[in-house]
Image: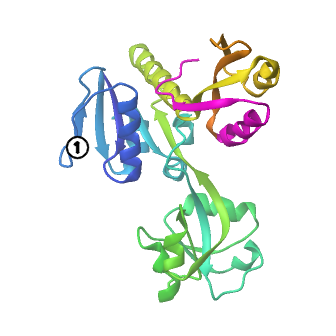
């Protein structure tokens, strides 16, 4: 059995559990249980504080973990990362009071900055040649400037609404983060095989999320133009229709390109375009 540590509550926890379920792994969970076992895969899940996860994996208490890159790098264990997971994306940013002027990061020279990420921020400022006084606090970082504790803050930002609500504005991006899968570097051969099985499932789920299955009808005269727009995994599937001179075309489209490609398909004569989600996608 391989042991996976995830955050015990919050959005990252929900997204991590959803990913595990989409990998076809079944388990029972509740708000008061701090660990659970999968019923159809040799996996035990631990529910921990996110700050504790890198250390647990480094020490071998947990074999694997899902954690934000910001937490992993701040803890000093970036080498544990084995795969980016594509969700819980955010940024670590510097922010100041909206009433304050700002030209560049050099304006923070000698200033007081409140943060929960002194290691990441310290390296960033050093790289910019700026010396500032860092005040490490946990939680409620946004209030620091308004109560005179600091001139600026450095904290995690997703939408920016929390900064706005506290009279702050974002001025610099220090670090970009997303959820990552991490692993102890001394896994046994058996656990390494289980990790690879889990990665294979996760990659299939993530690949499916990024793509859509598309079906359309097109005149044979436009087939070359349609095929040029829909390369698919290798090439599109083309099937003759009962109506002479028409074919059905099936392919896979990256979701980021979908609307742009759809417009081009219509322009070359495609009709009856259907788009369907993909549950799993094995390459």
Residue name at image x 22 percent, y 39 percent? 29
Rendered residue at 49%/72% (across/down): 162
The answer to whether 198 appears left or right of 218 in the picture is left
Residue wearing tag 1: 34
Q: Quadrant of the C terminus?
A: top right
Tell me the quarter of the picture where residue 269 sits: top right
Q: Which residues are magenta?
A: 256-283
**Residue nearer the viewer, 253 or 156:** 253
State the residue lying farthest toward the front: 243
Is residue 259 found inside the magenta-colored segment of the image? Answer: yes
Residue 92 x/y as whole percent: 58, 61
Q: Is residue 31 above or below residue 124?
A: above
Say if residue 60 shows up in the picture: no
The image position of residue 148, as x and y in percent, is 51, 88
Name which quarter of the figure residue 3 lies in.
Answer: top left
Kindly identify the residue that appears in the image at 76 percent across and 25 percent down: 226
Residue 200 x %, y %: 49, 21
Quadrant occupied by the N terminus: top left
Say if the magenta span includes residue 48.
no
* Residue at x-position 37% and y-position 32%: 20
Pointer 1 local density, CA inside 10 Å: few below 14, some 14–19, many at least 20: few
């Amino acid at each position: 059995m391989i042991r996976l540590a995830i955050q015990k509550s919050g959005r990252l926890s929900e997204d991590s559990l959803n990913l595990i379920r989409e990998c076809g792994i079944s388990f029972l969970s509740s708000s008061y249980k701090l660990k659970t076992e999968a019923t159809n895969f040799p996996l035990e899940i631990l529910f921990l504080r996110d700050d504790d996860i890198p250390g647990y994996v480094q020490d071998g208490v947990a074999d694997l973990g899902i954690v934000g890159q910001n937490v992993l790098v701040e803890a000093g264990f970036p080498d544990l990362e084995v795969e980016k997971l594509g969700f819980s994306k955010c940024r670590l940013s510097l922010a100041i009071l909206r009433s304050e002027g700002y030209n560049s990061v050099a304006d923070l020279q000698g200033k007081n900055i409140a943060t929960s990420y002194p290691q990441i921020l310290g390296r960033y400022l050093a790289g910019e040649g700026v010396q500032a006084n860092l005040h490490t606090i946990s939680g409620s970082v946004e209030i620091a400037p308004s109560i005179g504790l600091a001139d600026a803050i450095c904290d995690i930002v997703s939408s920016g609404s929390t900064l706005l609500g506290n009279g702050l504005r974002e001025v610099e991006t220090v670090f970009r983060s997303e959820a990552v899968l991490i692993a102890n570097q001394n896994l046994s051969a058996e656990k390494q095989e289980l990790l690879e099985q889990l990665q294979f499932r996760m990659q299939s789920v993530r690949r499916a999320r990024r793509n859509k299955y598309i079906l359309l009808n097109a005149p044979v005269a436009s087939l070359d133009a349609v095929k040029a727009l829909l390369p698919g995994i290798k090439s599109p599937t083309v099937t003759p229709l009962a109506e002479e001179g028409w074919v059905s075309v099936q392919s896979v489209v990256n979701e980021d390109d979908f609307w742009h490609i759809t417009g081009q398909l219509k322009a070359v004569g495609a009709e009856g375009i259907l788009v369907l989600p993909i549950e799993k996608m094995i390459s």
